[in-house]
């Protein structure tokens, strides 16, 4: 069974909006590239899929855009070639090496987890909340940025029940960001 890892950038006050001053730097991009390379596939909701595709899909010209720094290209290449699953009730089709997940997404994700492999990676806000409520996330990874946003969507806002976590790993970055990795504590009878 392959684990489902939820990974996201977050501010010190819990904001997880990509426009809340969470600009990538070279060190964090290397980190996220390595994390995505550990996954067999990426799992996105519609909003995250469309946002990632607009930023990281290789143009038809086969040349990365001028706005992209050289150190961003390995991340772009990794996400561009990755297998993707998109949970959406509104999209009629997807491409960019993606497959549309329809119907009971909880059952679909459970089936994906039962396949052999290294793991699945999920990002975004809405879909991870629903997956956490279903108890399907096996690992939480937060790259906590030294920023106070003061506004925007917050991490797992609306979670139905408390999830107790145990620390697995911690890594500090030169920028002051800290990568924190946790696993849910399993209650055994």
Image (cartoon, rainbow, N blue to C red):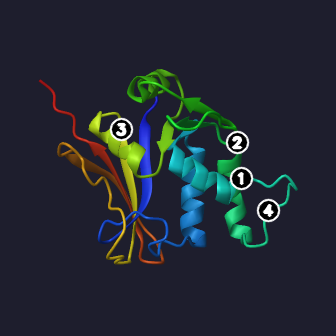
- Mark 4 lies on a secondary structure that is loop
What's the distance in space between the residues labelled 3 and 4, CA to CA?
33 Å
Residue 156 in the image, given as x and y percentages of width and height = 30, 52
Residue placed most toward the observer, 113 or 173: 113
What residue sits right under mark 1 in the picture?
Answer: 57
Of marks 3 and 1, which one's residue comes earlier in the chain? Answer: 1
Residue 146 horizontal/vertical position (percent): 38, 77
Give neighbour class at mark 1: few <14, some 14-19, many 20+ (Cα, 10 Å).
some
Q: Residue at x 78, y 66 (%)?
A: 65
Q: Residue at x 54, y 66 (%)?
A: 28
- Among all residues in the image, which is located at the extreme right? 61
Looking at the image, is mark 4 or mark 2 nearer the viewer? Answer: 2
Residue pointed to by mark 3: 131
SS class, disc 3: helix
Q: Which mark is residue 96?
A: 2
- Which quarter of the rendering shows the N terminus? top left
| Contact between labelled residues 1 and 3, with CB atoms less than 8 Å apart | no
Quarter of the image for the C terminus: give it.
top left
- Residue 110 left/right relative to 186: right
User: How many angstroms separate mark 4 from mark 1 (CA)?
Assistant: 9 Å
The answer to whether residue 170 is above or below residue 86 is: below
The answer to whether marks 1 and 2 mark residues whose Cβ atoms lie closer than 8 Å is yes
Q: CA distance from mark 1 to mark 2?
A: 7 Å
- The answer, for residue 108, to whether it is visible in the render is yes
Residue on which disc 4 sits: 64
> Considering only order in the chain, which callout, 1 or 4, is on the residue closer to the N terminus?
1
């Amino acid at each position: 069974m392959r684990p489902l890892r939820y990974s996201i950038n977050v501010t010190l006050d819990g904001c997880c909006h990509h426009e809340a001053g969470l600009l990538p730097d070279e060190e964090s991009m290397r980190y996220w590239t390595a994390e995505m390379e550990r996954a067999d596939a990426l799992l996105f909701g519609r909003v995250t899929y469309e946002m990632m595709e607009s930023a990281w899909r290789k143009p038809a010209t086969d040349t990365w855009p001028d706005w992209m720094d050289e150190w961003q290209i390995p991340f772009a290449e990794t996400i561009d070639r990755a297998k993707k699953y998109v949970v959406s009730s509104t999209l009629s089709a997807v491409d960019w090496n993606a497959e549309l997940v329809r119907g009971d997404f909880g059952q679909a994700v459970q089936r994906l987890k039962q396949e052999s492999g290294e793991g699945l990676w999920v990002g975004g806000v809405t879909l991870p909340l629903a997956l956490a409520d279903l108890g399907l996330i096996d690992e939480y990874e937060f790259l906590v940025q030294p920023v106070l946003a003061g506004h925007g969507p917050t991490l797992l806002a609306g979670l139905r029940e408390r999830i107790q976590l145990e620390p697995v790993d911690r890594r500090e970055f030169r920028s002051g960001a800290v990568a924190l990795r946790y696993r849910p504590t399993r209650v055994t009878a």
